[in-house]
Amino acid sequence: MIQRIEAGPRMSEASIHGGVVYLAGQIPDDASADIEGQTRQVLEAIDALLAAAGSDKTRILRAQIYLADIGDFAGMNRAWDAWVVPGQAPSRATVEAKLANPAWKVEIVVTAVI
């Protein structure tokens, strides 16, 4: 059985199957914020979805981070490093990508154990 969280006509914010939660790409609410602010917003959204699924950031298996400008890597990492639990950092990849909204600086996708 597949459980969906915040299912919409185009996509679900998260899908759960086999004890694993798969989050859709999370984007900032306030696109006028700088890279650290946008990253914090995205990480807060991830925390909320993981909680809704019965998980948390210590159970993330992997994270895929998309930056509109790889020059924002250091700023994104400042927000990430303040958020991630020491000793519980997931496997991670960070790439530069053209995001759907030109004002977005970051989008993050995570997969976690329930």
Image (cartoon, rainbow, N blue to C red):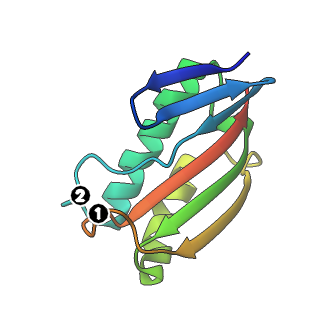
Is 66 on the left or on the right of 91, as rendered? left
Which residue is identified by label 1?
101
Residue at x-position 29% and y-position 63%? 101
Task: Name the amino acid type tagged 2.
Answer: Ala
Quarter-of-image position of residue 114: top right
- Please, is residue 89 above or below residue 36 in the view? above
The percent position of residue 40, horizontal first and vertical second, equals 40, 50
Residue reaching furthest right? 18
The label number, if any, that marks residue 31 in the structure image: 2
- Please, is residue 55 above or below residue 64 in the view? above
Residue at x-position 18% and y-position 61%? 32
Contact (Cβ within 8 Å) of mark 1 with mark 2: yes
Residue reaching furthest bottom? 71
**Can you say which quadrant of the picture contains the N terminus?**
top right
Mark 1 to mark 2 CA distance (whole Å): 9 Å
- Within 10 Å of the Cα at label 2, are there few (<14), some (14-19), or many (20+) other Cα atoms? some
Quarter-of-image position of residue 16: top right
The percent position of residue 19, horizontal first and vertical second, equals 79, 23
The percent position of residue 90, horizontal first and vertical second, equals 73, 51
